[in-house]
Image: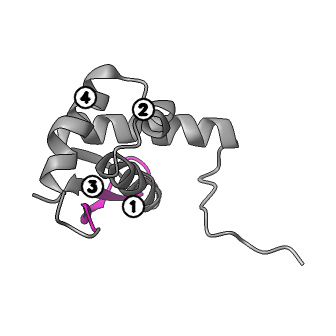
Amino acid sequence: MIKNLGRNKLGRTSSHRRAMLRNMATSLFLHERVTTTVAKAKELRSYAEKLITKAKKGKHLEVRKEIHDKVAYKKLFDVLADRYKTRPGGYTQILKLGERTGDNASQGLVRLVT
């Protein structure tokens, strides 16, 4: 029996999806907000929150395998891990912005909770 494991494929290959999530998470950590489609935002939320939890626990190597930008990596450990030290989860928030004019895709803003 084939079961869906809860991941949205987003119409991409697995390597493209993984690279896209890495890049979006890097942008989220650097700018603390990213505008994208709602489907991508929901996938990014899960990915980014797991990375923040690993950073809180001090797992440098596991985070370094995912985040390749040195500035985002440093900010994740120095700023964000300290900010969410006492928070048990729920580091991101998705706000719906409406539809995009070109293809009518629903847009969302992913931001880090302060």
**Mark before the other along the chain sequence, 3 or 1:** 1
C-alpha distance separating marks 4 and 1: 28 Å
**Part of the protein shown in magenta:** 90-108
Let me know if residue 104 is in the magenta part. Answer: yes
Q: Amino acid at mark 4?
A: Lys
Q: Estimate the x, y position of residue 29 in percent, counting from the top left.
A: 26, 39
Residue 104 visible in the picture = no
Distance from disc 2 to disc 3, alpha carbons, whole Å, reads: 18 Å
Give the secondary structure at mark 3. Answer: strand
Q: Is residue 104 left or right of residue 2?
A: left
> How far apart are the two marked residues, 4 and 2, measured between alpha carbons?
10 Å
Q: Residue 82, how many percent across, how many down?
A: 15, 48
Q: Residues within 10 Å of mark 1 (few under 14, many from 20)?
A: many
Provide residue 31's location: percent of width, then percent of height.
19, 37
Q: Which residue is mark 4?
A: 74
Whole-number angstrom distance, CA of label 3 to CA of label 1: 9 Å
Query: Which callout, 3 or 4, points at the residue further toward the start of the chain?
Result: 4
Nearest to the eye among marks 3 and 1: give it: 3
Which amino acid type is marked by label 3? Answer: Val
Any mark on residue 67, and which?
2
**Quadrant location, the N terminus:** bottom right
Q: Which mark is residue 110?
A: 3
Q: Is residue 67 visible?
A: yes
Q: Disc 1 on helix, strand or loop?
A: helix
